[in-house]
Amino acid sequence: MAVAKKKSAAKRGPKPGAKRAAKKAVTSKSSAKKTLAKKAPAKKTTAKKAPGRPRAAAATSTSAMNASVVAASKKLDKAEADLVKAQAKLDAVAVKKATARTKVATVKSVASKRALDTAIAQEKSAKEAVAKVKQAVKAAKFDQKVAEIEAQAEELKARVELKAAEFEMSLTTKQEEDLAKEIAKFESKWRQARVRKDAKKLKAFRAKEEVKSKAAARKIKAKVKSLAKKEATKQKPGPKKRGRRPGPGRPPKAKASAAS
C-alpha cells in the first residue's frame, strides 16, 4: 500500500507541473500574439497620423493598455509559478506522509506517530497553500482577461478617434473647396450685376454731359452770331450828312481904311 501511494504521489506530482508549464507556454504564446496584435495597430496609427494631438493621445492610451496587459500577464505567470512550487511542496509532503504512515505500520512508536501527525499537518497546510495559490491564479487569469478586453476597447476607441480626425480633415478640406466655389460664384454674379449697374450709370452720365455740351454749344453759337452781327454793322457804310452850301453873301468890307 505504501509503495502504491508513493507511486501515485510520484505520478501525481509531475502532471500538474507539466500541465501548468504547458498552460504557461500556451498562455505566454497567446499573450505574445495578442501583444503583437495590439502593438501592430499602434505602429500603424503612429505612421498614419499627421495632426498630432488626437493621434498622440490615442497612441498613449493604447501603449498604456498594452502595459496593463503585459503587467497582468506577468502577474499570471508568477501565480502559475507559485502554483507549481506549492504543488511540488504538496507532493513532497504527501510522499513524506506516506513514508511516515509506512513506518507507523511497521514500527509503532511515539516518534513515528508524531512524525505521521506532523506530515499530515504539513500536508493539510500544503493543500491550503495550493488552494490559495489556485485562487490567485484564477484571479490573475480574470485580471488578464479584463485587461485584454479593456485594451481592445481602448484600441477601438483610438480607431474611432483616428477616423473622426481624418473625417474632420476631409470636412475642412471640403469646406475650403466649397467656400472657394461659392466665392467664385458670388463674384461672377456680383460682377455681372455691377457691370449692368455701371452701364446704366454711364448712360445717364453720358446723357447729362451731352445736355450740358449742347447747351454750351448753343451759347457759343449765339455768341458767335452776336459777334458776327456786330462786325457786320461796323463794316456797312452809313448815309451822308446834309450841310449848308456857302453863298455869295455879303462882300467883305473894301479897304475902307485905305480910302480914308
Image (cartoon, rainbow, N blue to C red):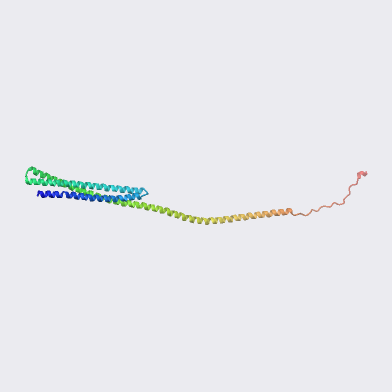
x%, y% of residue 157?
A: 32, 51
Q: Nearer the viewer, residue 177 or 210?
A: 177
Quadrant occupied by the C terminus: top right
Q: Residue furthest right?
A: 259
Image coords of residue 64 (percent x, y): 30, 47
Q: Is residue 168 above or below residue 114?
A: below
Q: Residue at x 17, y 46 (%)?
A: 88
Q: Position of residue 65 (x, y in %)?
A: 29, 48
Coordinates of residue 143 in the picture (x, y in percent): 24, 49
Residue at 52% across / 56% down in the picture?
195
Residue 151 visible in image: no
Can residue 32 be seen in this snapshot? Answer: yes
Residues 85 and 127: in front is 85
Say left or right for 24 vs 184.
left
> Disc count in the image?
0
Decide if residue 226 is on the left or right side of residue 168: right
| Residue at 14% across, 48% down | 10
